[in-house]
Amino acid sequence: MPVSTAVSPWQEELRCAIRDAATLCDRLNIAPPTAGQGQRQFPVFVTESYLARMRPGDPDDPLLRQVFPDLREDASQPPRYGRDPTGDLAARRLPGVLQKYAGRALLITTGSCGIHCRYCFRRHYPYSESPRTLPQWEPALKQIAASPSISEVLLSGGDPWMLVDRRLEELITALESIPQLRRLRVHTRMPIVVPQRVTDGLLAPLRSSRLACYIVVHANHARELNGEVAGALAKIRAADLPLLNQAVLLRGVNDTYAAQRELCERLLDLRVLPYYLHQLDPVSGAAHFETPPELGPQLIAALRASLPGYGVPRLVREDPGATSKTLLA
Ligand SMILES: *Cc1c(COP(=O)(O)O)cnc(C)c1O
Ligand code: SF4
């Protein structure tokens, strides 16, 4: 965090974030359940903005569940659960660059996020090796430039919108100078968890880019999408940036028809297209979020019977080594 320049509201929001389970319970007025050891390696991190959307007194709140270090994280995990569930390590081309699919390269721009989601598939990723400054990105950018088949770059992480505007702008400018690139995609949960992050300075380089820029946000529950978030999303849209959402199917969070339906309806109200509903990646520590295999397809069938076609996400799973996400419904 820069000390020399004025701290912006979104940085202040991050600075004040809640970082332990006891404070979280205290603030929500719930008897503190025993928190797991999982929080040692992957600490609690929740902003005040996100906390304000939780229901006080409800230990089963779907937003709280996403961030609370459940004791079950420490329980022995089923055999297929591991530290690299999506084959990220095998897909590393250079430090900070993953390529799994034709035409698309993904940049791990930072390891930081505006929230710590307990089900995160990259909760064990070796972020420290990723480039930080533009000179450090140079080899990766050269390699992308030398790959004529790559037409789209995804900024991922961590959360790319944790970077300050100047870092993002220099990275975008460098990508724009690679002639064969046509699209830039930003995968971010910041508009949902730190809506203050969506500023004119953040959006300006995307709005004016020669690249077609798409923003993919990550909301799992309709209650995440309050008025403050709606305002942030409206700003993104007003900058001519199309908005998509990806969600993860999570037991105890959004594993009912009512929850999925309301999420899709709310996203459509806010002009965000539901893109993917991901099956949980089997990352160790997250087995308590797993849903029965038949549930996802059943939910999608029920959504398809009640929503417009464009309002139904694709149910997908990420299989290591596959040439695309695996479409399940
Ligand atoms: C998920 C993913 C993408 C994007 O896949 P789409 O189906 O185009 O959304 C690209 N690269 C990597 C490494 C991914 O994991
Ligand atoms: S915002 Fe995304 S990358 Fe960050 S902890 Fe949550 S799921 Fe993981």
Image (tube, rainbow, N blue to C red):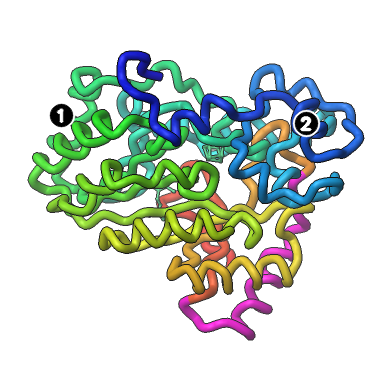
Q: Residue at x 21, y 53 (%)?
A: 207
Q: Which amino acid, mark 2?
A: Glu
Q: Which amino acid, mark 1?
A: Lys
Q: Nearer the viewer, mark 1 or mark 2?
A: 2
Q: Residues within 10 Å of mark 1 (few under 14, many from 20)?
A: few
Magenta highlight range: 289-310
Q: Is residue 251 visible?
A: no
Label 1, on which residue? 142
Please state the horizontal and vertical placement of residue 165, each as a whole percent of the image. Answer: 28, 34
Quadrant location, the N terminus? top left
**Residue 282 vertical position relative to residue 318 in the rendered view, above or below:** above
Asked if the residue at label 2 sits under 8 Å from ligand 2, the reply is no
Residue 309 within the segment the image draws in magenta: yes
Q: Residues within 10 Å of mark 2 (few under 14, many from 20)?
A: many
Please state the horizontal and vertical placement of residue 70, each as a whole percent of the image. Answer: 80, 34
Query: Which image quarter has ligand 2?
Result: top right
Quadrant location, the C terminus? bottom right
**Residue 50 vertical position relative to residue 95 in the rendered view, above or below:** below
Q: Residue at x 46, y 48 (%)?
A: 191
Residue situated in front as seen by the camera: 112 or 86: 112
Please state the horizontal and vertical placement of residue 125, each as a whole percent of the image. Answer: 52, 26
State how far apart marks 1 and 2 are (Cα).
40 Å
Which SS class for mark 1?
helix
Residue 105 within the segment the image draws in magenta: no
**Residue 62 vertical position relative to residue 119 in the rendered view, above or below:** below
- Residue furthest to the front: 6
Label 2, on which residue? 73
Write down the quadrant of residue 179 in the picture: top left
Q: Residue at x 69, y 38 (%)?
A: 67
